[in-house]
Amino acid sequence: MRAAVRLSGALITLALGFNLMVMAQSPAPGTNPEPGSGAATDKADTSKADKLVEEIVAARAQYQLALERLRLHYLKVNDQKRAEWAEEELKAFIQTRKQSFNLQIGDVPPPNLVPAFNVPEANKLYREALKYKDQGYRSAYIANQCTAEQMFQQLLTLYPRCDKIGEAAYQLAEIYESTAFRQYERSAAYYERSFQWNKTTQSDARLRAARLYDKVLRNQPKAVRLYKEVIDHDTNDTRVKEAELRLEQIK
């Protein structure tokens, strides 16, 4: 098993293009319209929070992009020592757990993405991410999970119509549910995207999302809806029976 993380130059170079795309797609800080003078205080507070989250998303992308550009500059002028400094700081940033303060801002893509094409580059990125996922122990495990997360997120951003988006969403859901992140709302959302993007899947994504909404997030209306979908869509007897039993218990 991989005990320590070594990021390839290919990943760092890919991240350069990824962050340019993120910055282009992210809303500019402060572009949300201000609520009118008669708006409720909670609406104004929500608008302010959204703007701050937009700033964080943009700042993260800008910081990583600046480090990547600095590294490439030092490589170009043959300053190996400073190039290594920039790469070391870049790796530390990539391998740091980051919170999603608002799933709708710079995080979970919409449910209507359609996987349409086989993209060899996306397949390669998917395989590379799997080399890091669930590998290592303690701090190395966390670093590897963060690296895998970054790569699966790159796949969704760079290749949103490739036929691996459903699988990538499932992998992200597992990463966010893992002890490295414990971001359960985020995990549940990506489990949902997994089966929404891949209509023919017979994985346990629906049931795992239902469990999270039911037992962790305490959102029973969503849990009930998903348990019913498991019964309607799943062909696995064990999963269907678990959904039926839990629905009876909730009643």
Image (cartoon, rainbow, N blue to C red):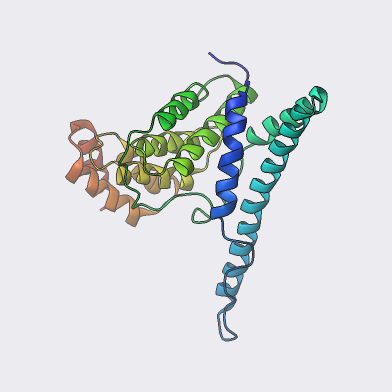
Q: How many marks?
A: 0
Which residue is pictured at 41% across the width and 44% down the height? 160
Residue 20: x %, y % from top left: 59, 46
Residue 8 lies left or right of residue 204; in this view the side is right
Does residue 38 appear in the picture of this structure? yes
- As drawn, the residue found furthest toward the bottom would be 38
Q: Residue 169's image quarter?
A: top left
Is 48 drawn above or below residue 145 in the view shown? Answer: below
Residue 50 lies left or right of residue 225; in this view the side is right
Residue 189 lies left or right of residue 153; in this view the side is left
Residue 219 lies left or right of residue 153; in this view the side is left
Residue 123: x %, y % from top left: 40, 28
- As drawn, the residue found furthest toward the front would be 77
Pick whichever, 98 or 60, lies toward us: 60
- As drawn, the residue found furthest toward the top would be 1
Residue 23: x %, y % from top left: 60, 51
Does residue 89 appear in the picture of this structure? no
Which residue is pictured at 53% across the width and 23% down the height? 132
Is 35 drawn above or below residue 60 in the view shown? Answer: below
Residue 122: x %, y % from top left: 43, 32
Q: Residue 164's image quarter?
A: top left
Which residue is pictured at 58% across the width and 24% down the height? 141
